[in-house]
Structures are given as structure tokens and as C-alpha cells.
Image (spheres, helix red, strand yellow):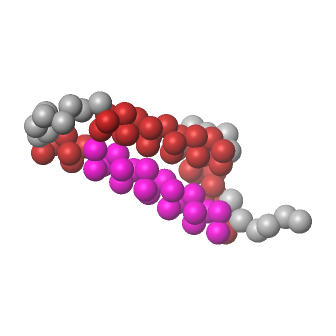
Amino acid sequence: MQHERELLRRYRAEDFRGLLRETHMLLVGLVKVMKNTHHDVRVKGYVIANLGCLLEQVSALVLRMKNVYNKVESVN
């Protein structure tokens, strides 16, 4: 339960649905940036690194959510 509260606090979410919404928004933002970059534009290395950091952040959030969810007991 402590891990879940920490995730919710860190991402300012009320519940796991809010965390999923945050994850979705991060991915949507990344996709928009990538799709709206003209194919002839040369992208600097630091831009690619920043996009990679954003993907890493989303990936880490999903992994943390998975780990927390694995610890939650099912209620029947």
C-alpha cells in the first residue's frame, strides 16, 4: 500500500486510473512530437536523448504500476 500511495503522490493522481491517464498523456505527447516533426528535419542528439528520457519515464511508471498491482490482493 505504501508503494501505491507514493506513486499516487508523485504523479498527483487520486487512483490507478489517474496513473493510467498520466501514462497515456505522456505517450500521447511523445507521439504528437514525433508525428509532427517533418521528415526532412534533422534532429539533434539532445532532442533524441530527451525523447528517450520521456519514454524511460513512461516505462518506469508502467513497471512501478505493475509491481504495485502484483502486490495488491484481489477482492472477491
Query: Which residue: 67% across, 40% down?
Result: 14
Q: Quadrant of the C terminus?
A: bottom right
Query: Which residue: 51% across, 56% down?
Result: 62
Query: Which residue: 28% across, 50% down?
Result: 52
In the picture shown, does residue 34 fall above or below 5?
Answer: above
Q: Is residue 75 left or right of residue 65?
A: right
- Residue found farthest to the right: 76
Residue 9 visible in image = no
In the picture shown, does residue 38 fall above or below 65?
Answer: above
Residue 16 visible in image = yes
Q: Nearer the viewer, residue 58 or 4?
A: 58
Q: Nearer the viewer, residue 61 or 40?
A: 40
- Residue found farthest to the front: 39
In the picture shown, does residue 1 fall above or below 21?
Answer: below
Residue 25: within the magenta? Answer: no
Q: Position of residue 42 (x, y in %)?
A: 10, 37
Query: Which residue: 43% across, 56% down?
Result: 59
Residue span colored magenta: 51-70
Which quadrant would residue 13 be assigned to in this image? top right
Q: Quadrant of the N terminus?
A: bottom right
Q: Is residue 38 left or right of residue 32?
A: left
